[in-house]
């Protein structure tokens, strides 16, 4: 089973000394948990300057897939940060921009045109903003991360209405919650993620081994869906 963590932070944290503060420490953590690859944002991009953090992302390490943090508009990130394909992260609450304002929608449409998917934290945008973004830019793939079990009703509302929305498993920890989402919407719409080191990584990894789903569905959740999204092929 090839395991890809779509939701991981590389770099130091403001209040904690973490193993994943550099690429070597991150790779050691992935090995410890049996995770083959991770999509990583840099902590500096989340908590300080997106351009500086994006520039600090690894380039040559094929197990660490760089995920730039983008900010729309003339005061946003450099246009060269917008990739073709792959993943980016939008943080409207943290970086104080309107997700569905004119600049936000322009960026979203550009990402959709480039077949680039978006990681979007549940705490970073309101239900109304997510709903509007998905409706205004239906070609955009949105991966909602860190949703939590208390958000299942709102999550179901969004996933029923918008087939382009996916969810990660980082905090989808309610009893059989992952199984319910996978059976209702398809395992391809559920992606393994941990949110580490902000949230625990061992719990979601252990949960992955115990999912009450067919092996093919577990493989999709573990890494197949992420690899398809990233255009990485089947993997090992």
Image (cartoon, rainbow, N blue to C red):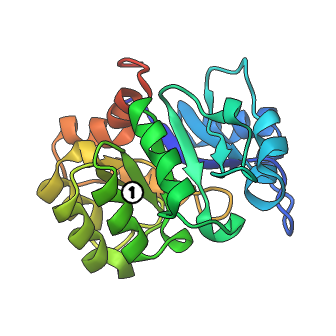
Per the image, the residue denoted by label 1 is 207
> In the image, is residue 1 above or below residue 101?
above
Residue 121 appears in the picture as rendered? yes
Residue nearest the observer in this picture, 130 or 218: 130
The quarter in which the C terminus is drawn is top left
* Outermost left residue: 184
- x then y, percent, for residue 25: 79, 39
Closest to the observer, 32 or 191: 191
| In this view, 45 is above or below 15 | above
Q: Secondary structure at mark 1?
A: helix
| Residue 149 spot, x, y in % from top left | 37, 76
| Horizontal and vertical percent position of residue 126 | 45, 76
State the image quarter where residue 28 is shown: top right
Q: Is residue 24 left or right of residue 204?
A: right
At x 30% / y 70%, what residue is drawn?
Answer: 155
Q: How many marks?
A: 1
Residue 152, given in percent of the width and then of the height, sits at 29, 75
Crowding around mark 1 (Cα neighbors within 10 Å: few <14, some 14 to 19, many 20+) is some
On the rendered structure, is 99 left or right of 43? left
């Amino acid at each position: 089973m090839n395991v890809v963590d779509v939701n991981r932070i590389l770099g130091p944290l403001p209040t904690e000394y973490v193993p994943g503060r550099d690429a070597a420490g991150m790779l050691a953590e992935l090995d410890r948990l049996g995770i083959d690859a991770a999509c990583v944002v840099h902590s500096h991009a989340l908590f300080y300057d997106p351009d500086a953090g994006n520039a600090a992302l690894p380039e040559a390490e094929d197990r660490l897939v760089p995920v730039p943090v983008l900010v729309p508009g003339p005061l946003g990130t450099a246009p060269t940060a917008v990739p073709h394909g792959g993943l980016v992260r939008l943080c409207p609450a943290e970086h104080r921009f309107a997700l569905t304002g004119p600049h936000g929608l322009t960026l979203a449409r550009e990402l959709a045109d480039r077949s680039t998917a978006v990681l979007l934290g549940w705490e970073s945008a309101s239900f109304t903003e997510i709903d509007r973004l998905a409706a205004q830019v239906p070609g955009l793939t949105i991966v909602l991360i860190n949703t939590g079990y208390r958000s299942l009703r709102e999550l179901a509302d969004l996933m029923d209405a918008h087939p382009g929305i996916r969810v990660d498993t980082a905090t989808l920890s309610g009893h059989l919650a992952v199984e319910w989402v996978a059976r209702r919407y398809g395992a391809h719409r559920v992606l393994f993620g941990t949110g580490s080191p902000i949230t625990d990584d061992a719990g979601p990894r252990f949960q992955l081994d115990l999912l009450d789903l067919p092996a093919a569905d577990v493989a999709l959740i573990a890494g197949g869906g992420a690899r398809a999204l990233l255009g990485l092929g089947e993997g090992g």
